[in-house]
Image (cartoon, rainbow, N blue to C red):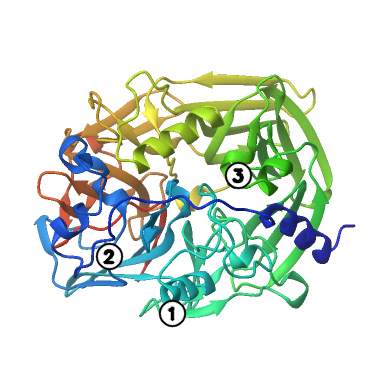
Amino acid sequence: MMQRRDLLKAGLQHVAGLGAVAAWPGAWAQGDGRDVCDVHDACPQGAFTQAPELAPLFGLPVDELDARDLVVEGRLPVGLRGVYYKNGPGLMARGGERYQHWFDGDGLVQAWRFTDQGVSHCARFVQTAKFRAERAAGRFLVPGYGTAIPARMPVRGPDSLNTANTSVLLQGDKLYALWEGGSVHELDPQTLATRGLKTWSPNLAGMPFSAHPKVEADGTVWNFGTSGHHMALYQLSAAGQVLRSTVFEMPSACAMVHDFAVSQRCLVFLLPPIELDLAALKAGESMVGAMRWQAQEATRILLIDKADFNQRRVLEIPACMAFHFGNAWDDGQQLHLDYVQNRDLPAANQVFRQIMRGERPGASEVPATPRFMRIDLASGRIELQSRDEAVEFPSVDPRFVAQRYRHVYYPSSVDLGDRWGFDGLLHVDIESGRRDRFSFGKEVVVEEHVLVPKPGRRQEGEGWLLGLCYDTRRQRSFASVFDAQALSAGPLAKVWLPYWVTYGFHGKFYAA
């Protein structure tokens, strides 16, 4: 069996030799984070006036945000008590240089606290080794995932590049900021102060731990990490104890595996046909620039037995790209899962480059859409169903992870025209095919929303949808709260910040 040292060695091959500075014209604006004009001055010329929905992509000019007694429009549910943690890229420029890819920004973790006394908000940058060194130097020092920056300080492994910018996980009094390429960072769940790198066990130090762990109703955590052609698997207890782990060689070259699904019996991966051109990487390309989409190859479905990681099976479907899954379930005979099928990698990365330049992607771009897969476990036969709604960031009831389910929720494009981003929310009943949706209109950008179960309720979907939005007219961010069973009725409440905050990726709600 492959050992930790071999996986880390494989990872070093992928971070060696990155180069070429990507210069950013214009000075990085300074300010207190509450005067939006300061931030907009740092955008490309005309970006804010012509594409106001892109303004929060251009980074936060301060390290901290705090606000108490937030204004509530509407009425918050009495039972909504706890903390909503959200992670995402928050810093996009330093020393006259600007990242060219959304995934590169340093992690900014937010905490929205819902209490009997009201709602408060705070946001802190994760104090990674990278963040601290670059802040002291006043410029970028290491390559980004999608930006070719020369290594101006030693790169000793994936954690030298760790931005801790993708998601969160809370276990007891330990909050983790997740990034799929390396270790997790432990934070204080009350103050968001960074405590340092987390080591699950001595033999797992420094190994990649993805940003999409799956947590079952009993607290069991399943996760993976990839480096080169190899994958690590983890099973953790609710208390964070490592129950099992292994490392093995993947059945096909795949330079990007972002998410997976878990059913009662299986771990399910889609391995898109993406190869990494090491010669291009060593010649100065970014990771994104060195990725090669092999359209003629298949996307491989990797099924792994949860009871025995050595029992693995590979099936194939035509080449497709998937970043995110909703959920999966199986009865021992058939396996069902849902995911979002994205643009193929070259087209997806073109969109990311455009929005980071302040440009709206072309209206002809094919959106990401829902897919539903059924696999006959005896024959390996695969059935695929699709829908045509433009969506991303699927979310399900957390009580039904790895169990039979029927409800999936997404941010969705309802009536955007040529504007970038999502303007509404979509609920799909995957058994009946029925949908329920709501649109805020073209002035609001909608981010990921998560389902928060109502206290004392047991039925799937009995809960609230909670997530963040940005109002381009007011230039302010807000949290929206919906009854998950009545989206079309509109939000129960909006909780307004006195400022805006950068767009995030993924969050979790933890009840008080």
| Circle 3 SS class | loop
Task: Please say if the residues under marks 1 and 2 sit with CB atoms less than 8 Å apart.
Answer: no
Visible residue check, residue 52 = yes
Gap between marks 1 and 2, in whole Å?
A: 23 Å
Work out whether 69 lies above or below 441. Answer: below
Numbered badge on residue 188: 1
Amino acid type at mark 1: Asp
Residue in view at x 41 percent, y 73 percent:
135
Gap between marks 1 and 3, in whole Å?
A: 36 Å
| Circle 1 SS class | loop
Gap between marks 3 and 2, in whole Å?
A: 28 Å
Amino acid type at mark 3: Glu
Question: Is residue 151 rendered to the left or right of residue 412?
Answer: right
Amino acid type at mark 2: Pro
Residue ID for mark 3:
285
Residue in view at x 73 percent, y 37 percent:
302
